[in-house]
Amino acid sequence: MMRGRTVWLIGEHLVEYLAEAARQLVTECHVGRVVLLTQTEDGAAAMRAALRDVPADLVHAAAVGDDLEAGIDAALSRHGYPATIVSTAFAPLPDKLLGGDAAASLDAGEFRQMVQEQLTHQFRVARKASLIDGTQLVLVSPDVPAGVDPTGAGFAMANFVKTTLHAFTATLAVENERLVHDVPVNQINLTRRARSEEPRNQAEHQEEVRRFGRAVLLAGAPLPDAEDSRYRSRIYRGMAITV
């Protein structure tokens, strides 16, 4: 069902994860085109470099800057309707918490920026994707890189974003069934339930990267039409996979 289709991967700092997803989409699903939407030209160049082993004619990277909506419109006009849209944040999480020591805490402006980068970004993508016929939307919660979060601030903030995205994903999945576009919505979690579940070394990190690619295939594969199976066409909407 994915053979020859177009897939969009939105994001910039999760280069390794998105590259593995693109690689598996090409090798396992035989997609015809992978469109990479980044925020900056440097991000687009990094994605191209990470996918040197994928035929160049299958990979199309474009920087959208701050005008995400215009970038999505341009990609739709240039590359046609995507089978799947995978959305990750352009920026990593801040390594600060709310409250406590002022030097180690987010102020109001920093918290507002974090919400815009991690949550409003996903809302902006979802608002556009929900009006695209024949696509699937996959929202990705943020990761916490192993060994770089000694205070636990990043992990706590990641769980705040993850649980907020859970509510958004479930609500959006239900609301999208009311629209004629009928876009299924699912979620992939790079955020763990406990810090003890996070990768402890490079081998476990690579395993997580491969599982992320597999999760994109599972969450982003087209579902059966309602005419084929009303039950199966709805059971996988609003679900979350933790990799």
Image (cartoon, rainbow, N blue to C red):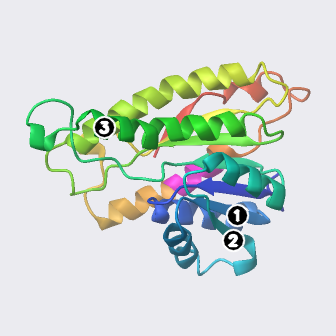
Which residue appears farthest toward the right when viewing the image? Answer: 227
Q: How many marks?
A: 3
Residue at screen point 14% across, 45% down: 151
Name the amino acid, label 2: Val
Residue 7 lies, in percent from the top left, at 72, 56
Can residue 118 be seen in this snapshot? Answer: yes
**Viewer-side residue, 174 vs 80:** 80
Local SS, label 1: strand
Closer to the chain start, of discs 1 and 2, is 1
Q: What is the CA distance from the residue labelled 1 to the residue labelled 2?
A: 5 Å
Hey, which quadrant is residue 183 in on the image?
top right
Q: Are dots 1 and 2 in contact, CB under 8 Å?
A: yes
- In this picture, which residue range is highlighted in magenta? 212-217
Q: Are dots 1 and 3 in contact, CB under 8 Å?
A: no
Residue at screen point 34% across, 34% down: 159
Query: 183 above or below 17?
Result: above
Local SS, label 2: strand
Local SS, label 3: helix
Give the residue number, with chain letter if any, for mark 3. 109
Residue at screen point 77% across, 49% down: 83
Hey, which quadrant is residue 135 in on the image?
top right
**Viewer-side residue, 132 vs 2:** 132
Which residue appears farthest toward the left when viewing the image? Answer: 101
